[in-house]
Image (spheres, rainbow, N blue to C red):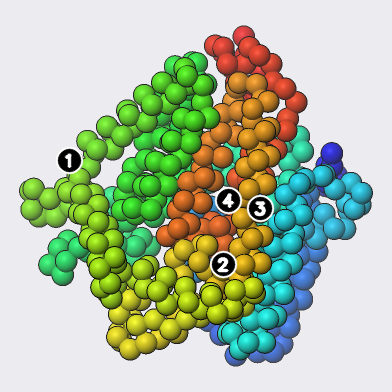
């Protein structure tokens, strides 16, 4: 067991973190405005300040920095920052926490974890694949971006597994993280209610050229929070506890519905099925009641919310349109139609043979492929273009990292599920077991979603999934809980309150 902490005043914490936030804003403003064309003296000074603040973060408690990083990754700021800006701040914070551990924690004090080996090998191989990709001529920007996301996944898992070695710290980190996700969901719902006049912070969907534009609240993190809350409901014995859980579940479910993402809908349903498998018989009934009640509320809201001037148009009709649109996409894909709607099928047709050509190491991180421009969003040409993004996690891993990378990725999740299932079976019934079940169900859902969206290796969701994996294992390896904890009057610490 390891606790990486030092005695520092609260004023020093506040001053250092405030300065870190200020310099992060300065860095973002400088890069966005002038980039590398800024004065060399200004860039040199900026680099010096960043180095000083990184050193300051290293002297803080690493756990504090990690919690701030996870809160940042899931907070509403992600709506206004670009992926590059978000990744820079994330790298800055996680780097400071990792440096803090490296400076103050002896190697022999590292907490053993069977997943550190495969995750470390994947991160190391990502560096090798990056060098290989640059040697093949892949773009440096794409290569560094791909490599960063895999390393971010590895760093977050390592930090969480090493720092959250006590029940108190685990619950504090979990509360901050889940509260940040919920805050982001509420902000997205507010923007949806305000409509297009709230700015271009939310994506939209327009079925036809003469249809009304419908905003979408696509928040992949919401699916994990949904799974956690659904699993907490069966163990809540007090009416007040059930009320607060349901109160949080409704906006989360509404957000998932308003995403208009068939993949996210399917991901959430998979999480419910897995949760049912993990629950005992009595818990399954309570879980189904909660899911049914929330679903009815969502459908009633969708039926009454009008989406245009037509009195017959409602969100419920939009949901139906999305389902039929998805069926049409599949039919066109199997029929061999080449269009925007069948771009996921085109990716398999184009990229699949290239995987066979380089099966061992793939084409290196940062590799692109040629696809007709009409199959890419926001392209004004139908001519073939070089494109980087691939929707399927397993296809993109085999394409860029070969069978070596895909084997390492599958090894991580096979080992994770074998470990967590074994630990879960030995847990006593209670809050910690419900939290672990929710996180596991959410991860299974994310792996299914990764067939259409590579969430495991995409920033910022890669950090969220790594955090969920590490937290579930930390919760499951705690000391046995008191058997009476699921009775009336139980708090989140698993101790009786009366």
Q: Which residue is mark 4?
A: 465
Work out how far the residue at label 2 is from the one at label 4, CA to CA, in angstroms. Answer: 17 Å
Residue at image point 34% right, 82% down: 373
Q: Nearer the viewer, residue 268 or 419?
A: 419
Residue at the extreme left of the image, as rendered = 311
Dot 1 lies on which element?
A: helix
User: x, y percentage for residue 367?
Assistant: 55, 79
**Residue 9 position within the rendered picture, expressed as x and y whole percent measured from the top left:** 80, 46
Label 1 environment density (alpha carbons within 10 Å; few <14, some 14–19, many ≥20): few
Task: Tell me the quadrant of the picture where the C terminus can be found.
Answer: top right
Tag shown at residue 397: 2
Circle 2 — which element? Answer: helix
- Which is closer to the viewer, label 4 or label 3? 3
CB-based contact (under 8 Å), mark 2 and mark 4: no
Between the residue at mark 4 and the residue at mark 1, the CA separation in whole angstroms equals: 35 Å
Q: Does residue 291 appear to the left or right of 179 in the view shown?
A: left
Q: Which residue is mark 3?
A: 412
Q: Is residue 298 above or below residue 41?
A: above
Which percent across, then down, holds residue 477?
73, 33
C-alpha separation, residue under disc 1 versus residue under disc 3: 45 Å
For marks 4 and 3, the one nearer the N-term is 3
First-in-chain label (4 vs 1): 1
Residue 24 can be seen in this image = no
Which residue position holds label 1? Answer: 304
Q: Earlier in the sequence, mark 1 or mark 3?
A: 1
């Amino acid at each position: 067991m390891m606790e990486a902490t030092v005695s520092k005043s609260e004023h020093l914490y506040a001053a250092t973190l405030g300065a870190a936030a200020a310099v992060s804003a300065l860095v973002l403003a400088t890069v966005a405005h002038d980039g590398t064309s800024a004065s060399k003296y200004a860039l040199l000074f900026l680099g010096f300040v960043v180095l000083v603040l990184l050193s300051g973060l290293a002297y803080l408690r690493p756990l504090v920095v990690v919690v701030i990083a996870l809160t940042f990754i899931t907070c509403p700021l992600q709506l206004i920052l670009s992926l590059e800006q978000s990744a820079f701040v994330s790298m800055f914070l996680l780097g400071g926490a990792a440096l803090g551990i490296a400076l103050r924690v002896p190697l022999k004090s590292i907490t053993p974890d069977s997943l550190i080996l495969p995750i470390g090998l994947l991160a190391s191989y990502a560096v090798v694949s990056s060098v290989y990709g640059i040697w093949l001529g892949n773009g440096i920007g794409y290569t560094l971006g791909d490599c960063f996301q895999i390393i971010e996944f590895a760093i977050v898992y390592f930090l969480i597994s090493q720092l959250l070695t006590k029940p108190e710290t685990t619950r504090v980190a979990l509360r901050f993280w889940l509260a940040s996700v919920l805050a982001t969901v509420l902000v997205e719902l507010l923007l949806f209610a305000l409509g297009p006049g709230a700015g271009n912070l939310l994506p939209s969907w327009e079925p036809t050229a003469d249809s009304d534009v419908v905003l979408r609240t696509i928040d992949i993190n919401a699916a994990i929070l949904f799974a956690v809350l659904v699993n907490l409901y069966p163990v809540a014995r007090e009416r007040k506890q059930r009320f607060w859980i349901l109160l949080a579940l409704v906006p989360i479910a509404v957000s998932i519905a308003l995403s208009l993402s068939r993949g996210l809908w399917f991901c959430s349903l998979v999480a419910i099925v897995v949760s049912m498998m993990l629950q005992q018989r009595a818990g399954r009934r309570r879980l189904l009641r909660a899911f049914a009640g929330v679903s009815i509320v969502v459908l009633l809201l969708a039926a009454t919310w009008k989406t245009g001037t037509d009195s017959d148009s409602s969100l419920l009709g939009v949901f139906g349109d999305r389902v039929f649109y998805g069926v049409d996409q599949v039919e066109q894909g199997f029929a061999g139609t080449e269009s925007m709607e069948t771009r996921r099928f085109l990716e398999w047709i184009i990229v699949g043979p290239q995987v066979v050509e380089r099966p061992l190491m793939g084409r290196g991180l940062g590799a692109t492929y040629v696809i007709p421009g009409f199959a890419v969003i926001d392209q004004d040409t139908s001519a073939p273009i070089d494109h980087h993004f691939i929707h399927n996690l397993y296809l993109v891993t085999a394409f860029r990292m070969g069978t070596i990378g895909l084997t390492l990725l599958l090894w991580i999740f096979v080992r994770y599920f074998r470990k967590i299932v074994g630990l879960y079976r030995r847990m006593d019934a209670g809050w910690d077991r419900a939290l672990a079940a929710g996180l596991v169900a959410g991860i299974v859902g994310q792996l299914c979603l990764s067939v259409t969206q590579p969430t495991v290796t995409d920033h910022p969701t890669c950090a969220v999934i790594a955090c969920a994996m590490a937290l579930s294992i930390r919760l499951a390896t705690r000391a046995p809980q008191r058997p009476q904890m699921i009775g009336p009057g139980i708090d989140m610490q698993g101790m009786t309150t009366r």
